[in-house]
Amino acid sequence: MKNPLLSLMTLSLLLFNIACKDDPKTPQSCDAVEFEYDGDLGPEHWGDLCLDSECNGNSQSPVNIAGATDDVALTDIPQTYTATATHIVNKGHTIQFNFDAGSSIVVNGEKYDLLQFHTHTHSEHEVNGAHAPMEMHFVHKNAGTGKLAVIGVLVEEGAENATLEHFVSHLPETKDATYEAAETFSATDFMPSDKSYFTYSGSLTTPPCSEIVTWIVMEHPIEASLDQIEHFEHLEHENARPVQPLDGRIIKHHKG
């Protein structure tokens, strides 16, 4: 004779699994989690999309950069940027340029290796409440701790950018599509000549929004033409997370 209690438990477990399978909001791993910039998968819901999300944390990015504190202890960021071949991938929400090994920066005495830069149109960070048309994020990783240092470079509309002009006609147009070329460039080609910057502790700006990032946002923008910026915007659409509360964090300023 079957145990009625065991049968009831089995039935309950089966119904629970079916319900979870059909519920798109059931938390899952943040690896390759799907997200959007509006609707049910938009930024206001990112904290519920996956199990290890920190998107509802207190040290989130981007932020509005205003009222920064001058810090004379800060110095120019030592940059060792070498030439890389061209490796472009369409990530769905952004266009990403991957770097060959050999480029790095030093932050607080620790080395961070340059992995990639990607773009946002418009900028994610605001400066005194205003967005730039575009922002580049240069992502560096410390091999020992796994923490990141990201240099944000704001891009204003202006003169044609000579380096970008080599790539705008080759940007992959569909998700996961790539473009490879032997043509080389360096991250230095996208850095402003003035090394002044703002810095604060923050997070990734996409899920899981891990709070492992030292942000370095260059004070002075670089320029690109409207046509160049629109090439990226056409492929990325709106891909800027809204600014997040500082929650007591201090933004420091280094004058280069």
Image (cartoon, rainbow, N blue to C red):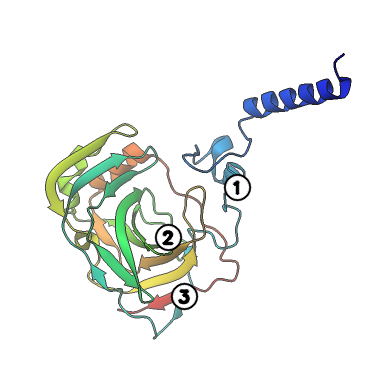
Q: Secondary structure at mark 2?
A: loop
Please state, as top left, top right, bottom left or bottom right, where the N terminus lies in the image. top right
User: Which of label 1 and label 2 is nearer to you?
Assistant: 2
Is 10 above or below relative to 189?
above
Q: Position of residue 100 (x, y in %)?
A: 22, 53
Q: Which mark is residue 146?
A: 2
Q: Residue furthest bottom?
A: 72
Residue, disc 3: 68
Q: Which mark is residue 47?
A: 1
Identify the residue shown where x is 43% and y is 64%: 145
User: Which of label 3 and label 2 is nearer to you?
Assistant: 2
Q: Residue furthest front?
A: 1
Residue 151 image-quadrant placement: bottom left
Q: Secondary structure at mark 1?
A: helix
Mark 3–mark 2 distance (CA, rounded to whole Å): 27 Å
Q: Nearer the viewer, residue 32 or 131?
A: 32
Crowding at label 3, few (<14), some or many (≥20) Cα neighbours within 10 Å?
Answer: some
Residue 232 image-quadrant placement: top left
* Three-letter code, disc 1: Gly
* Three-letter code, disc 2: Gly
Q: Residue furthest left?
A: 183
Is 210 above or below relative to 13?
below
User: Which of label 3 and label 1 is nearer to you?
Assistant: 1
* Three-letter code, disc 3: Ala
Please state, as top left, top right, bottom left or bottom right, where the C terminus lies in the image. bottom left
Crowding at label 2, few (<14), some or many (≥20) Cα neighbours within 10 Å?
Answer: few
Identify the residue shown where x is 83% and y is 24%: 6
